[in-house]
Image: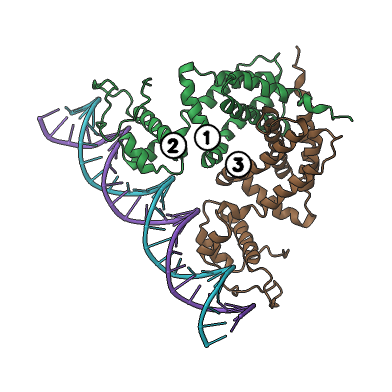
Chain colours: A brown, B green, C cyan, D purple
DNA sequence: TGCCGGGTGGCACTGGGTGTCACTAACGTC
DNA sequence: GACGTTAGTGACACCCAGTGCCACCCGGCA
């Protein structure tokens, strides 16, 4: 991912097969599909951020990425999916982390640690992450779509809780832990985005602490 | 709202202006728009439940409701909106209930009580509620759309918490309480729907208790 | 050389949603 | 009673997301 490419994305001039950013031609395209996917993602993120998700048509993204509209929809089932990087891989990683959890740790702590680790991005990737999350949390259409993606996360977390407690993944507690921890995670993301001075990890921990302690600061009514 | 009309909805035979279910013509239509809205809702709910949300076209709903496609989209901005009854009124009522809360009650208890009261349906309305919620929680497209509607709920709850704690509605705690209580509410709905033996109110209370106590059953690790 | 298979582009089609215009039924006014 | 006004409506054209289909191109392989 070339940094310093904040300007225009390649437009139509991109040759059919991958040329590295410095201009050298990679002789044997290792994975054509992955390269186009990446180019499309970059173009889409750029356009969405500049103009707004609804205002950008699939044709415009395709043009900017130097491919056809049809190819765009072959790489991403939905306009919205172009924003979600390799989210499936993230969910898989979350699942692995949860599976590797030691049983002597409280369940909520395990989940928190897994969330923190999955969202532990390198410093140079943070700008892209902010861009992505600002879109997902800000654009109504993407906010709606997110529910479908998060359903996978919830399923994974609920299954983990169910394993730990011996209940069914369909029972109240596992589901509730899954949905409320995800609520905590997304809220932490929102606050982190809006704030800008704190770490994502710190905000996640703060949110999970509140949740795990049952919102202690709310426990005592003003008791006038 | 005429009960006992579980059969087919009016199809095309409906005259341009309102005829009561028994056939008598109401001379002066009291509120044409509200009547068409109700007819559309009923037709949409019926068709969606029978065939699936994605499979039903706006034309089919319009036909079933005896109006034109254009009129359908004038009454409901979206196919999905036809499922959400008068949700705006529910949010407004939730807001009133929260505003009327006594300050000597713990915040979470107030929110729980408000949720329970807003969702306190008469026995004869429960079937429709189940139908509606089964669609919203089951159909991916509606599940996605729900996020947008719930954003209003979250805003209302966050503002209430902010008032009670003196924080900004944009701060972590108010947002977190809003999103996680909503998570609790929707999870309770899911479990209530799937179960069928419990009360919605009881399930809501159970979920809120877990949340308010910080998931006590998870607190102690197996401590082998 | 011919065959095969994957990535692609072009094209037509469905369906959600919108803007516009014309029609009609109330309603009030002169 | 003729007139303008207004709200609800239907018809039509349009944009755009997404899909199915087919033809093409190109690298690999017998």
Kindly tell me whether residue A215 is visible in this rendering.
no
> Residue A208 appears at what percent x and percent y?
77, 34
Kindly tell me whether residue B118 is visible in this rendering.
yes
- For the N terminus of chain B, the quadrant is top left
Instruction: Rate crowding at label 2 as few (under 14), some (14 to 19) or many (20 or more) other CA atoms within 10 Å.
Output: many
Position of residue A146 relative to residue A42, above or below, is above
Q: Is residue A198 left or right of residue B64?
A: right
Q: Secondary structure at mark 2?
A: helix
Q: Which residue is mark 2?
A: B48
Marks 3, 2 in one chain: no
Q: Residue at x 76, y 13 (%)?
A: A223
Q: Residue at x 73, y 39 (%)?
A: A188
**Mark earlier in primary sequence (2, 1):** 2
> Residue B20 appears at what percent x and percent y?
28, 22
Q: Which residue is mark 3?
A: A147
Q: CA distance from mark 3 to mark 2?
A: 20 Å
Residue closest to the eye, D14 or B210: B210
Of all chains, the one bearing label 2 is: B
The furthest residue to the top: A224
Q: CA distance from mark 1 to mark 3?
A: 12 Å
Of all chains, the one bearing label 1 is: B
Q: Is residue B12 left or right of residue A175?
A: left
The nearer-to-camera label among 3 and 2 is 2
> Residue B61 appears at what percent x and percent y?
37, 38
Circle on res. A180: none
Q: Residue at x 54, y 36 (%)?
A: B138
Q: Which residue is mark 1?
A: B136
């Amino acid at each position: 991912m070339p940094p310093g490419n904040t300007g225009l994305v390649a437009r139509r001039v991109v040759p059919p097969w991958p040329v590295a950013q410095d201009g050298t031609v990679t002789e044997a395209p290792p994975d054509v599909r992955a390269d186009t996917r990446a180019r499309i993602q970059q173009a889409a993120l750029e356009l969405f951020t500049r103009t707004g998700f609804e205002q950008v048509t699939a044709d415009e993204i395709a043009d900017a990425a130097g491919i056809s509209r049809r190819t765009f929809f072959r790489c991403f089932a939905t306009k919205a999916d172009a924003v979600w990087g390799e989210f499936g891989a993230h969910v898989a990683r979350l699942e692995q982390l949860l599976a590797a959890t030691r049983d002597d740790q409280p369940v909520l702590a395990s989940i928190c640690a897994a969330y923190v680790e999955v969202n532990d991005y390198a410093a140079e990737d943070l700008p892209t992450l902010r861009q992505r999350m600002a879109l997902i949390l800000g654009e109504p259409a993407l906010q709606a779509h997110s529910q479908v993606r998060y359903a996978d996360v919830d399923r994974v977390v609920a299954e983990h809780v169910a394993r730990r407690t011996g209940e069914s993944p369909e029972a109240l507690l596992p589901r509730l832990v899954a949905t409320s921890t995800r609520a905590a995670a997304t809220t932490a993301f929102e606050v982190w985005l809006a704030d800008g001075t704190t770490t994502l990890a710190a905000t996640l921990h703060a949110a999970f602490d509140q949740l795990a302690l049952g919102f202690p600061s709310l426990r005592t009514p003003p008791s006038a």
